[in-house]
Image: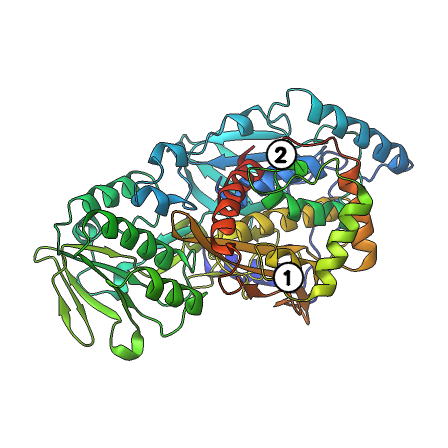
Amino acid sequence: MPRTHSPPPLRPRLRGRGRLGIAVLGILALTACTTADQGAIAGGSGDDLSPPDRTERLAAACNGCHGVDGSGSGAMPALAGRDSAFLAARLRTWRDAGTGSGPDHLMVRFAQALDDTDIDALARHYAALPPGTTP
Amino acid sequence: MTLTRRHLLRGAAGALALPFAGPLRAAGRDARVLVIGGGFAGATAARYLARWSPRTRVTLVTSPERYWTCPFSNTAIAGLRSVDRLEVDYGALAADPGVELIRAEVTELDPVLRRARLADGRVLEADRIIVAPGIDLDGARIDGYDAAAAQRFPHAWEAGPATALLRKRLEAVPEGGLVIVTAPDNPYRCPPGPYERASLMAWWLQQHRPRARLLILDAKDAFTKDALFRAEWQARYPNLAWSGRSDGATLRRVDARAGTLHTDFEDHAPDLACVIPPQRAARLARDAGLDGGRGWCPVEPLAFESTLMAGVHVIGDAAIANPMPKSAFAANSQGKACAAALAHLIEGLPAPAPVLMNTCYSLVAPDAAISIAGAYGVRDGALETLEGTAGVSPAEGGGVRAAEADHAHGWYESIVADAFG
């Protein structure tokens, strides 16, 4: 159902800080993952006031299986710190395969929802994160 | 609080036509968002909103009672995992600097004024409320279903002590005995749950009571991953049988004193019955009028805002989000979509197209699992499954069942950490 109204901002938007904010978020994300983090999702205390872009929202979906910030968990492979070309190539292979015969059949399904821009952005996103605990 | 007709009309009008003007907002101050319910949906929404909208004041109210995850609780019934290992530790959420965690029952929710009253008398106000209360069991459609029946035929559809009870009852089943699992009609929490449970109970019986039988009485003729489940049952569990609605297997009446189950077709006197009753949105949501009297809560698909009450969002099992199933992964995904939408709305930006996904693993034996996946988008104002994204596990080959069992364990650790920290 299309919304017939557009809510006004609940607080004034601060302007001119977006680019700096993203840089700060990146640094905070790195430090938050390498120090003992008290439960907050990495980046949560950043000064970045931009709402999450599509890449962040896609990555959040990946983390549901692949662990917080793609850190991996048991047999679920880590994504953080992987080579971006490797990640992008895997996603393209799955997307183009159309069907899967192994446990990666799930990835074949999800890759159908990704376009080239998504794939490259996700690959860069995880490549920039510090490696997780799962090899 | 009793909702008056005027309240309801105001809420409906607000959702459909009037501009949203947060009556609780003071100019220039940070937004306040109240999340009610600390399960997979609510905890995820609170954590991700704190991350994505760091200046927003995020308060999460969840029950002071202990909480155990429903995912993987079937492994505890089969003795593969202790119930203790299902318990959620809220320590990380309590320590999250972006989330104020309150452990209290919510006694009243006013969706029009966007206020919640807690059992200790405190009243919380917010610009937006995210309601994630989960389900209530609704035994009214089964004659004779009452508290005694729930004890005699444990559903264990809310994990914890009930899980332990069902485990204990399973261990008491005599050799050669009959175990029955009943599955409700759609919709209900965790569509593959009854079949995973039956599989793992059958596995345990096979090891310890090899002459015992397990019968599934289903109020449906088809169920999720049914071809895969049936193939696994045929290969693994000769003592497991399934009957569906067309076989007259819909459960109509129970007799807790006699210990009997009665379907359209026949009567059963099992040694153990796990009766999973029909369900509906938890009472908090229904009392607030968020279900419109329908049992489940209608929402729009971008921000999961109630179509009945403006400014109130409903996520997780309580929401109508077809074709997404009522699963922990879907709840987690909806929590993120709702948080992302609110992070935009708070800045005066339109909610983006949501990223919504589901993954459900079901163990058919301790070392074998099958799975289902889907990704969802919005078309013509409704959720739809994105083309090519829906599918289930391939046929066995190359050890895929064993590999998916390993993935299921990794999935569980990840989703719990993602939702609760």
Question: In this figure, which residue is indicated by the disc labeled 1?
Answer: A109
Quarter occupied by residue B380: bottom right
Specify the subunit that label 1 lies on: A
Q: Is residue B46 above or below residue B216?
A: above
* Residue beneath the point at 75% across and 34% down: A129
* Residue beneath the point at 18% across and 50% down: B209
Q: Position of residue A48 (x, y in %)?
A: 80, 34
Specify the subunit that label 2 lies on: A
Q: Position of residue B408 (x, y in %)?
A: 50, 47
Instruction: Specify the amino acid type for callout 1.
Output: Arg
Instruction: Specify the amino acid type for callout 2.
Output: Thr
Residue B128 makes an appearance in the image: no
The residue most toward the left is B258
The residue most toward the front is B398
Residues behind callouts 2 and 1 on a single chain: yes
Closer to viewer: mark 2 or mark 1: 2
Quarter occupied by residue B273: bottom left
In front of the other: B267 or B334: B267
Badge 2 marks a residue whose secondary structure is loop
In front of the other: B129 or B367: B367
Quarter occupied by the C terminus of chain B: top right
Question: In this figure, which residue is indicated by the disc labeled 2?
Answer: A134
Residue A83 located left or right of residue B290: right
